[in-house]
Image (cartoon, rainbow, N blue to C red):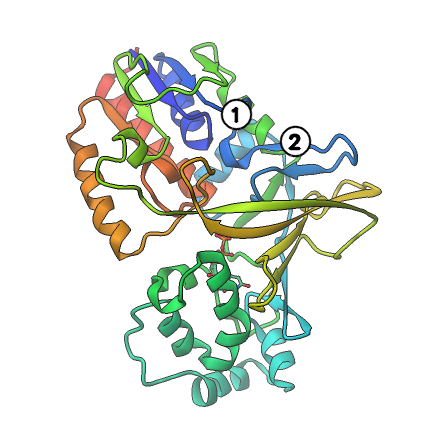
Amino acid sequence: MQITIVGAGLSGAVAGRTLAEAGHRVTIHDGRPHVAGNCHTERCPDTGVMVHLYGPHIFHTSDAEVWDYVNAFTRFRPYRHQVKTTVQGAVYAMPIGLHTINQFFGRTFRPDEARQYIEEHEADRSITDPQNFEEQALRFVGPRLYQAFFKGYTEKQWGLPPSSLPASILKRLPLRFDYNDNYFAHDFQGMPEHGYTPMVQAILDHPNIDVHLKSEVGADQVARGDHLIWTGALDGYFGARLGRLGYRTLDFERFTATGDWQGCAVMNYGDPDVPWTRITEHKHFAPWETHEGSVLYREVSRACGADDIPYYPIRLVDEMAMLQGYQALADAEEGVTFLGRLGTYAYMDMDVTIRAALDAARGLVDRFGQA
Ligand code: UDP
């Protein structure tokens, strides 16, 4: 079979590789001059620091097969993600754990004491079934922690009142009653030694795969072959005929420094009067390397225009209704598989993206058979 894939990010690469290994011919188009989509990394020519050009990507998963999969294409180095946040004139650890609770309330609670204090004195127990981000936060941490750590950051990140956002966004973050300050709770976590782009290049390095970069093809122009895998925007495929699905985009304000500018990879800024949500210092994403220079980015989130890069699917009630319309169109589309964060309009992490691409491509191999 001849398979065409639009998009050389993780979804396109993993699906393409699976089909290529089954003997199918795969042609991949991507409008950008590089593979790896938004997890693209490159070395800064001035400082030598490995830079995550479209924002930091930390690989974390509890899916052992996905972990083995990525490790087969590149060497991963141990990396443990820790995040600090600056709010109300102090620096705290995120996500909220025992250190942050004790520091914020000026207490010396042990785990059970902290749990009891939050539940009895902070949490809003009148909320029995949280319906949105704000209710979820008020129910679990109460108004004071919510105001300090979540409200301002979330309004900046999403441009909306947290009462209009789904509770699922907050559920990405744990609330802990110990001193574990690992941002993630997954079994496996690491960084590719040479960045994500060589990893994706290695996935694509197969005699049955042809990659065409700077090759912007719309749904109407692409030569589809026997099957098309579309990892571009779902609404874009259908010419936005039901309307535009909402995304947030990011502006990155780059600056350089010498030495260690902020002492950690990610510093969040929860206060509403600071325009950026966070500052990332990329040398800390490769702690095994040493560089005198440093590259940092302030991240400012805003509504995504037609010419901007979409990052975060908003998935509000309006978008979810529109999404169902597009999903119905996608289901009715013969010979096309929609994949990835853009192709399915889902807030997916890298491991989930890989899992979905593996499963979908294996399904196609079952359907088409080995070539
Ligand atoms: N969040 C927050 N304060 C923080 C960090 C996160 O309010 O200091 C909220 C924010 O709404 C964010 C959500 O928690 O969108 C999920 O955070 P996560 O770190 O998973 O976001 P991502 O990795 O997608 O940027």
Q: Tag 2: residue type?
A: Glu
What is the spatial separation of the Cα atoms under label 1 and label 2, in whole angstroms? 11 Å
Q: Is residue 244 left or right of residue 341?
A: left
Which structural element holds mark 2? strand
Mark 1 or mark 2: whose residue is earlier in sequence: 1
Establish if 45 lies above or below 181.
above
- Asked if one can make out residue 301 in the rendered structure from this viewpoint, the answer is yes
Q: Assign the C terminus to one quadrant of the image.
A: top left
Q: Tag 1: residue type?
A: Val
Which residue shows up at 31% across the image and 27% down it? 362
Which residue shows up at 40% across the image and 22% down it? 16
Establish if 257 lies above or below 334.
below
Q: Is residue 364 left or right of residue 258?
A: left
**Residue under pointer 1:** 35
Picture coordinates of residue 227, whole percent (x, y): 27, 18
Which structural element holds mark 1? loop
Picture coordinates of residue 241, whole percent (x, y): 22, 35
Q: In front: 231, or 177? A: 231
Picture coordinates of residue 80, whole percent (x, y): 63, 52
- Label disc, if present, on residue 42 of the rendered structure: 2
**Circles 1 and 2: CB distance less than 8 Å?**
no
Picture coordinates of residue 155, whole percent (x, y): 47, 63
Q: Is residue 367 left or right of residue 301?
A: left
Q: In front: 318, or 344? A: 318
Q: Quadrant of residue 192?
A: top right
Residue placed farthest to the bottom in the image?
121
Q: Quadrant of residue 91?
A: bottom right
Which residue shows up at 74% across the image and 37% down it? 49
Q: Assign the N terminus to one quadrant of the image.
A: top left
Q: Is residue 243 left or right of residue 110?
A: left
- Label disc, if present, on residue 141 of the rendered structure: none
Establish if 292 lies above or below 272.
above
